Image: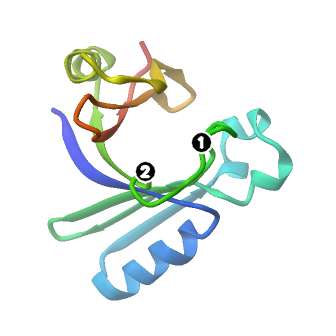
Amino acid sequence: MLHCTPFLLFDGNCAEAMTFYHQCLGGELTLTKLGDTPMKDQFPVEKHGRIINARLTSGLIDLSATDWMAAPNVEPRPGNTVSLFIVGQTYAEVKAVFEQLAEGADPDPCTLLHPMPFGSYGQFTDRYGVAWVFKSDNPA
């Protein structure tokens, strides 16, 4: 079953921001540093302390976040730091929605749905200017 949550992008202060939200909203906060994942070798050492995944759950509140690690030609700015995050259990489940929403999407930046150490991942901005991020628990 698909699940949607707001996805927040920070520029090096994700842990600080999510800790603040946790203090305000309560619940459970999970922070995962890039350096603690198999993906660390794909990034320079100076990024290993950044948060690759944060999740705060409190009752019906569910927030996901990360520190900005996009391509060097894309910088965080107002308007591109919030996305809708679609999570599913299977690649096929996520791929079907990804392909439908991607129709007419801005090809730059667009990351096609592809396998990652944690499952599969993809992202794009749709034809209406809404940013989407997709993850499945299982790779293709």
Q: Nearer the viewer, residue 59 or 84?
A: 84
Residue 27 vs residue 97: left or right? right
Other-residue count near label 1 (Cα within 10 Å), few / some / many at <14 / 14–19 / ≥20: few
Residue shown at the point (48%, 78%) measured from the top left: 19
Residue 123 vs residue 49: left or right? left
The image quadrant where one finds the N terminus is top left
Residue shown at the point (42%, 69%) measured from the top left: 29
SS type, badge 2: loop
Residue 48 vs residue 6: left or right? right
Question: In this figure, which residue is indicated by the disc labeled 2?
Answer: 80
Residue shown at the point (31%, 82%) measured from the top left: 26
Residue 28 in the image: above or below residue 54: below
Place of residue 89 in the rendered image (x, y in percent of width and height, measured from the top left):
28, 29
Amino acid carrying mark 1 in the image = Val
Place of residue 82 in the rendered image (x, y in percent of width and height, measured from the top left):
37, 54
Amino acid carrying mark 2 in the image = Asn
The quarter of the displayed image where residue 130 is located: top left
Q: Nearer the viewer, residue 57 or 100?
A: 100
Question: In this figure, which residue is indicated by the disc labeled 1?
Answer: 74
Q: Nearer the viewer, residue 109 or 59?
A: 109
Residue shown at the point (27%, 14%) measured from the top left: 92
What distance separates the C-alpha of mark 2 from that of mark 1?
Answer: 10 Å
The image quadrant where one finds the C terminus is top left
SS type, badge 1: loop
The quarter of the displayed image where residue 61 is located: bottom left
Whichever of callouts 2 and 1 sits on the residue coming sooner in the sequence is: 1
